[in-house]
Image (cartoon, helix red, strand yellow):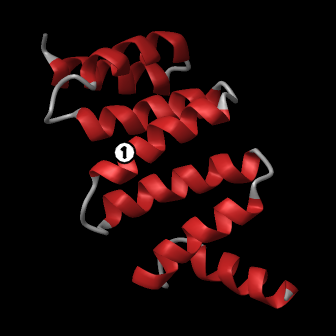
Amino acid sequence: NDYPARFALGGLLLESGQVDAAIAQFQQSQKGPAVRVNSLVGLGRCFKAKRLFDLAVTQLTLAKNELTTMDDAKKEVIYELVACYEAMGKADLAIEEYKVIYSEDIGFRDVADKINAFYAKG
């Protein structure tokens, strides 16, 4: 029941390419309030690595909704979510999420370039 330890182990397993083992750890660690959101993001990244984009979207959306302040952590979650939408060919959903970041932080990663390219297509 040491959720932070399970979360840390999940991260190490994901980094080493043991995605299924990482999923198991993140599924357990999400039960711990202190690491819940980060565990959901970890699950999302695992599912994304396995190209299970719909499952990744579910986890990342949960994480996004649990973060109430638009800080760097929430922007990272949204950025991960956008990557899944793009991989699924859902450009309309991706651009809507890019707009959420853009409206708060024009300098976050390559979001301004993405928004400018979208509007340049007109």
Residue 24: percent from the left, percent from the top? 40, 11
Residue 87: percent from the left, percent from the top? 75, 46
* Vertical comparison of 112 with 32: above or below: below
* Displayed quadrant of residue 68: bottom left
Q: Nearer the viewer, residue 17 or 52?
A: 52
Residue 72: percent from the left, percent from the top? 33, 65
Q: Which residue is mark 1?
A: 63
Give the secondary structure at mark 1.
helix
Q: Nearer the viewer, residue 11 or 118?
A: 118
* Vertical comparison of 46 with 13: above or below: below
**Quarter of the C terminus within the rendering:** bottom right
Count every numbered label the image shows and give the total: 1
* Vertical comparison of 14 with 33: above or below: above
Q: What residue do we see at 46% from left, 43% from top?
A: 60
Q: Is residue 26 visible?
A: yes
Residue 10 left/right relative to 7 = right
Residue 42: percent from the left, percent from the top? 41, 33
Q: What residue do we see at 65% from left, 24% from top?
A: 50
* Displayed quadrant of residue 76: bottom left
* Displayed quadrant of residue 9: top left
Q: What residue do we see at 29% from left, 67% from top?
A: 71
Specify few, some or many for label 1: CA neighbours under 10 Å numbering under 14, 14-19, or 20 or more: many
Query: Which amino acid does the dot numbered 1 rest on?
Result: Ala
Q: What residue do we see at 35% from left, 52% from top?
A: 65
